[in-house]
Image (spheres, rainbow, N blue to C red):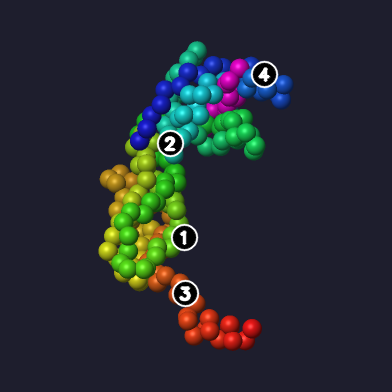
């Protein structure tokens, strides 16, 4: 689990004009909420936040004037064309607290022969301690044959992590590669022309 320290400043100006002014200074407006507290409006350094958000489920340690909190990003708004950060919603968490998050499922290895892997679920929901969220789960399909399947309940989760998704949900299966057009069918199509 990655934890990043970011300097936060309280924000007192609101609205589109204030948000644009913050973005021009290479900062990002943010809101910190959770645990029944009043939402707190913050300003965060844009570059540091952008780097932190490259890690899924990053734990952000906010420090600054009267601020010393740990948060998870819950909502990230980006400019649809240029991709820069416009706004971030942060969820307040405490050490030892359990949170439900989605983690990626990645496939390693190659199945036997021309079989291919079909992966309907690329992420699963798990419940884990806020400071020990796994970065992802790997499934090895090396040497597996057609018919091999993995359901969410079959995944090996790290200690202290429990599955929040349906255990019967299909994560991946190995299937036969689609057959190329048979030569006889190709000849029949040419003869018809």
CA separation in Å, label 2 and label 1: 22 Å
Point out which mark residue 21 bears: 4
N-terminal-most mark, 2 or 3? 2
Residue holding disc 2: 55
CA separation in Å, label 4 and label 3: 58 Å
Residue holding disc 3: 180
* Figure label count: 4
| 97 displayed left or right of 33 | left
N-terminal-most mark, 2 or 1? 2
**Residue 99 visible:** yes
Label 2–label 4 contact, CB within 8 A? no
SS assignment at label 3: loop
Task: Decide: few, some or many residues near mark 4? Use Cα within 10 Å; few <14, some 14-19, many ≥20.
Answer: some
Task: Decide: few, some or many residues near mark 2? Use Cα within 10 Å; few <14, some 14-19, many ≥20.
Answer: few
Which residue occupies 36% across, 54% down? Answer: 107
CA separation in Å, label 2 and label 4: 27 Å
- Magenta residue check for 119: no
Residue holding disc 1: 120
N-terminal-most mark, 4 or 3? 4
Instruction: Mark 1 vs mark 3: give the one in front.
Output: 3
Label 2–label 1 contact, CB within 8 A? no
N-terminal-most mark, 4 or 1? 4
Q: Position of residue 48 (x, y in %)?
A: 48, 24
Instruction: Mark 4 vs mark 3: give the one in front.
Output: 3
Compare residues 105 and 30 and report the one nearer the observer: 105
SS assignment at label 1: loop
Q: Position of residue 157 (x, y in %)?
A: 31, 50
Compare residues 146 and 71 and report the one nearer the observer: 146
SS assignment at label 2: loop
């Amino acid at each position: 689990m990655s934890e990043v320290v970011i300097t936060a400043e309280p924000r007192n100006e609101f609205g589109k004009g204030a948000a644009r002014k913050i973005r021009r200074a290479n900062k990002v407006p943010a809101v910190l909420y959770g645990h029944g507290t009043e939402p707190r409006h913050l300003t965060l350094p844009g570059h540091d936040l952008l780097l932190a958000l490259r890690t899924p489920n990053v734990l952000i340690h906010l420090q600054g004037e009267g601020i010393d909190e740990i948060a998870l990003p819950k909502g990230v708004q980006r400019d649809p064309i240029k991709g820069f950060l416009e706004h971030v919603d942060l969820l307040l968490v405490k050490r030892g607290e359990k949170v439900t998050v989605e983690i990626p499922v990645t496939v390693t290895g190659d199945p036997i022969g021309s079989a291919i892997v079909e992966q309907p679920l690329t992420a699963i929901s798990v419940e884990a301690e806020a400071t020990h969220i796994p970065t992802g789960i790997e499934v090895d399909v090396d040497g597996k044959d057609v018919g091999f399947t993995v359901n969410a309940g079959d995944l090996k989760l790290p200690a202290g992590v429990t599955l929040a998704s349906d255990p019967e949900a299909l994560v991946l299966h190995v299937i036969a590669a689609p057959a190329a057009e048979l030569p006889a069918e190709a000849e029949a199509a040419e003869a018809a022309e």
